[in-house]
Structure formats: structure tokens, C-alpha cells
């Protein structure tokens, strides 16, 4: 099969998948209102699995840029703005040409078809599964020779312990919340990096890298809550991480508010340098 024909074939699968299929190969709500025959189910599941394998290889095995997977959905907003503020120190992670910003890494979104099909739409359990099955998935490809690493970036708190445990279990090394090293080579081109702990703290989330004054910003009389809203619903006088990212950080933060993100950029750079030194 020629490369051009294969791309066209995959594109036809993409259209089919986006219309009717869920990540497990079943129909979405609102899809065709009829019962599929057994042969149709097998065929569409096979097409779905082929497209999923293609996406996995394209994103993690053939990416021209390092791929960063964030544990938090708002982290990408923080990281892009931080790199823009720190661009003079990290020319390998961000460049500006003719007024256009070009990131040296690819931040994979939590939403959209790729995230949906690869089951990477956020959540600790999904990253644990991704880490635990990475070696097995890579082994299915005969021509796995990636030129760039894949880096999972997490907070440093109890919520992400399963991710760090899974990474340590698949690696020759170990990474803990308390570890002074902030990234770990897991296997092949996969790495896990964590937010460095601020001095005197035993746990931290990425929002704590911002200044106290920025985190104290009031929105319509409400204060920021960094608690997990699934376990602790927001109160009437609180706002959460999404509003903090979109209304405070994106619109009010100044360059100096991102100074503490240098340690995160250093962790990403460290993983990149380790991969390219092998």
C-alpha cells in the first residue's frame, strides 16, 4: 500500500470513527439507530483499532517534536504562557519568528478525537494504564525508532502517587513525591516528570508555583480553591482551576508571575537531554 493511499484510507477511517464510534468501538449516542450485525461489529472494531494504532504511532513514535502529556487539563495554559514569559532562557522549548510563537514541544490536548480514541482525556487512572501498557504497545510495531521523547508531567501530591508508582514499576529507577530528581526514564522514549516541591513543602500542585498575590485574586468576590472539585464541590464563594487559568493567569498574570516555572522547564529540558544523550 502506497503512503498516499494509506493516508487517504486512514482519513476515511477517521471520518467513520468520529461519526459513530466510541473509544471502545461501540456507537456513540446519536449514531445510527439500528443494531449492527456481528460482521459489522467486528469490521468496525477492527477499523477503529487500526486507526487507534496509527494515531499511537504517529503521536508517540513519529512526532517531530517532544510530546508533553499533562495530568491537569489547565496545565497547558500555564505552561505555554510560562514559556512565553521565559523564552529568552529556553530557546530550545520556544522560538519566535516574524512575530509568530513556535513551541519546541507538542502539548497534547485533553479533548478532541486523538485524546478520545487514545483514551488520554485526563485522569490519573488513564495515565496509569498508559504507562503500564506502553511497553506492550510499542512491542507491536516493527519499526519503532522515535526521534523524540514522550513526557508525562504531573503534580507532586497524593493524587498522582499511582502515576509515580506505575512509572517506577516499569522503570529501572524510581521516582517519589519526595525525590530530589524531577524526572524518570520509564521505558523506550517515555518519561515522567513531576512538579518540583517548593522549599519546606511535602506536596504541591502546579498552581502553587504562582505567586501568593496572583493566587489571592478575587473573581466576583470569590476566592480560588485548589481542591479536587469532584470530591469537594465549589462553594458559592469559591472558583476553581479552570477560571483561575482562563480569567486570572491568561488575562492578569505578568512575566514575573512565571519565575517559579523555570524549575518545570528545567525538568522538561532534562528529560529531553537525557533522551537525546542515549
Image: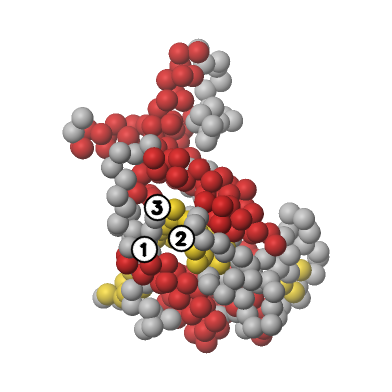
Q: Tell me how the rendering is colored.
A: secondary structure
Task: Report, in whole angstroms, how far the alpha carbon at label 3 lies from the one at label 2.
Answer: 8 Å
The picture places residue 32, in percent across and down from the top left corner, at: 52, 23
Pointers 1 and 2 in contact (C-beta within 8 Å) = yes
Residue 182 vs residue 171, the one in the foreground = 171
What secondary structure is found at the residue carrying circle 3? Answer: loop
At label 2, counting other C-alpha atoms closer than 10 Å, the crowd grade (few under 14, some 14-19, many 20 or more) is many
Residue at the image point whose x is 54% and y is 32% from the top: 24
The picture places residue 73, in percent across and down from the top left corner, at: 57, 59
Pointers 3 and 2 in contact (C-beta within 8 Å) = no
Task: Report, in whole angstroms, how far the alpha carbon at label 1 lies from the one at label 2.
Answer: 8 Å
What residue is shown with label 2?
185
The total number of labels drawn is 3
Task: Report, in whole angstroms, how far the alpha carbon at label 3 lies from the one at label 1.
Answer: 9 Å
Q: Quadrant of the C terminus?
A: bottom left
Dot 3 or dot 1, earlier in sequence: 3
Q: Quadrant of the N terminus?
A: top left
Q: Is residue 238 above or below residue 63?
A: below
The picture places residue 42, in percent across and down from the top left corner, at: 46, 19
Dot 1 or dot 2, earlier in sequence: 2
At label 3, counting other C-alpha atoms closer than 10 Å, the crowd grade (few under 14, some 14-19, many 20 or more) is some
Residue at the image point whose x is 73% and y is 69% from the top: 225
What residue is shown with label 3?
188
Q: Is residue 231 above or below residue 269?
A: above
Residue at the image point whose x is 54% and y is 55% from the top: 167
Q: Which mark is on residue 275?
A: 1
Q: Is residue 248 above or below residue 259?
A: above
At label 1, counting other C-alpha atoms closer than 10 Å, the crowd grade (few under 14, some 14-19, many 20 or more) is some
Amino acid at each position: 500500500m502506497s503512503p498516499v493511499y494509506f493516508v487517504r484510507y486512514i482519513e476515511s477511517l477517521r471520518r467513520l470513527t468520529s461519526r459513530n464510534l466510541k473509544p471502545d468501538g461501540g456507537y456513540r449516542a446519536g449514531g445510527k439507530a439500528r443494531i449492527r450485525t456481528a460482521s459489522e461489529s467486528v469490521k468496525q472494531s477492527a477499523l477503529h483499532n487500526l486507526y487507534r494504532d496509527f494515531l499511537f504511532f504517529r503521536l508517540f513514535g513519529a512526532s517531530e517534536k517532544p510530546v508533553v502529556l499533562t495530568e491537569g487539563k489547565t496545565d497547558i495554559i500555564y505552561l505555554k504562557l510560562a514559556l512565553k514569559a521565559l523564552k529568552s532562557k529556553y530557546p530550545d522549548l520556544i522560538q519566535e519568528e516574524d512575530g509568530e510563537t513556535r513551541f519546541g514541544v507538542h502539548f497534547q490536548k485533553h479533548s478532541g478525537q486523538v485524546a478520545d480514541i487514545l483514551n488520554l482525556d485526563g485522569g490519573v487512572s488513564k495515565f496509569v494504564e498508559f504507562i503500564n501498557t506502553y511497553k506492550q504497545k510499542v512491542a507491536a510495531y516493527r519499526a519503532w525508532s522515535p526521534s523524540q521523547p514522550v513526557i508525562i508531567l504531573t503534580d507532586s501530591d497524593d493524587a498522582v502517587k499511582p502515576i509515580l508508582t506505575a512509572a517506577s514499576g516499569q522503570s529501572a529507577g524510581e521516582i517519589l513525591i519526595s525525590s530530589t530528581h524531577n524526572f524518570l526514564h520509564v521505558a523506550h522514549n517515555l518519561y515522567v516528570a513531576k512538579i518540583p516541591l517548593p522549599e519546606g513543602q511535602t506536596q504541591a500542585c502546579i498552581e502553587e508555583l504562582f505567586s501568593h498575590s496572583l493566587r489571592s485574586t478575587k473573581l466576583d468576590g470569590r476566592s480560588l480553591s485548589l481542591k479536587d472539585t469532584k470530591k469537594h464541590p465549589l462553594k458559592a464563594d469559591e472558583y476553581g482551576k479552570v477560571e483561575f487559568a482562563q480569567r486570572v493567569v491568561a488575562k492578569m498574570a505578568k512575566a514575573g508571575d512565571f519565575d517559579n516555572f523555570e524549575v518545570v522547564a528545567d525538568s522538561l529540558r532534562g528529560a529531553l537531554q537525557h533522551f537525546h544523550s542515549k
